[in-house]
Image (cartoon, helix red, strand yellow):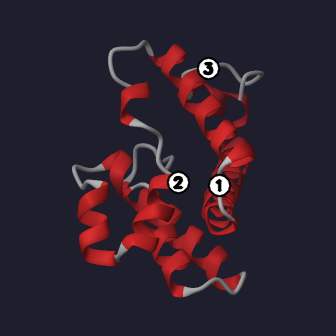
Amino acid sequence: MTRFVSPIGYLCCLKNVMKILCETGCEIEVITAGILHDVVEDTSVTIEQVECIFGNRVATLVKGASEPDHLRQGLDAKISWRLRKQHTIDFISQEASLDQLLVACADKLDNIEAIRQDAISKGEKVWERFNVPKADQ
């Protein structure tokens, strides 16, 4: 079962990102942001709540790892996906701090590993769960 439909898989992603950041020797705020990197996108928690509880630095890192909500609302999945991914590419290549890059790269590395593992067990069917075809991924 993939992490997109499994709470266990979702929690494993957070653990894996944390592990990558720990092994890289990151500071506690970066590791904390890695654990929280999807909280704003995937729950009702706001960036303001993250800042109130964990501080400005963690909130800034989480915000850097979060796709803007307005890029998802009212758009079909394929258009939304392209806009969100382009936003991420633009942010990483033009604005991100080193710590934001560390969080983003740890997440992307874990995502790639999850896809690789699914491809081993499911073959080409792994690409059916995405909003866009394999070539666009």
Mark 2 nearby-residue class (10 Å; few <14, some 14–19, many ≥20): many
Helix, strand or loop for disc 3: loop
Distance from disc 3 to disc 1, alpha carbons, whole Å, reads 26 Å
Which mark, by number, is residue 64? 2
Decide: is 34 above or below 95. Answer: below
Identity, as a three-letter code, of the amino acid under mark 3? Val
Q: Which residue is the site of mark 3?
A: 132
Decide: is 8 above or below 91. Answer: below
Identity, as a three-letter code, of the amino acid under mark 1? Ala
85, 8: nearer the viewer = 85
Q: Are marks 2 and 1 in contact (CB under 8 Å)?
A: yes
17, 94: nearer the viewer = 94
111, 29: nearer the viewer = 29
Q: Are marks 2 and 3 in contact (CB under 8 Å)?
A: no
Decide: is 134 above or below 48. Answer: above
Identity, as a three-letter code, of the amino acid under mark 2? Gly
Distance from disc 2 to disc 1, alpha carbons, whole Å, reads 7 Å
Helix, strand or loop for disc 2: helix
Residue 107 in percent (x, y) is at 61, 58
Q: Which residue is the site of mark 1?
A: 96
Decide: is 100 above or below 115. Answer: below
Mark 3 and mark 1 lie on one chain; the one further toward the N terminus is 1
**Residue at (35%, 76%) from the top-left corner?**
55
Q: Are marks 3 and 1 in contact (CB under 8 Å)?
A: no
Q: Is residue 121 left or right of residue 76?
A: right
**Residue at (69%, 59%) from the top-left corner?**
105
Mark 3 nearby-residue class (10 Å; few <14, some 14–19, many ≥20): some
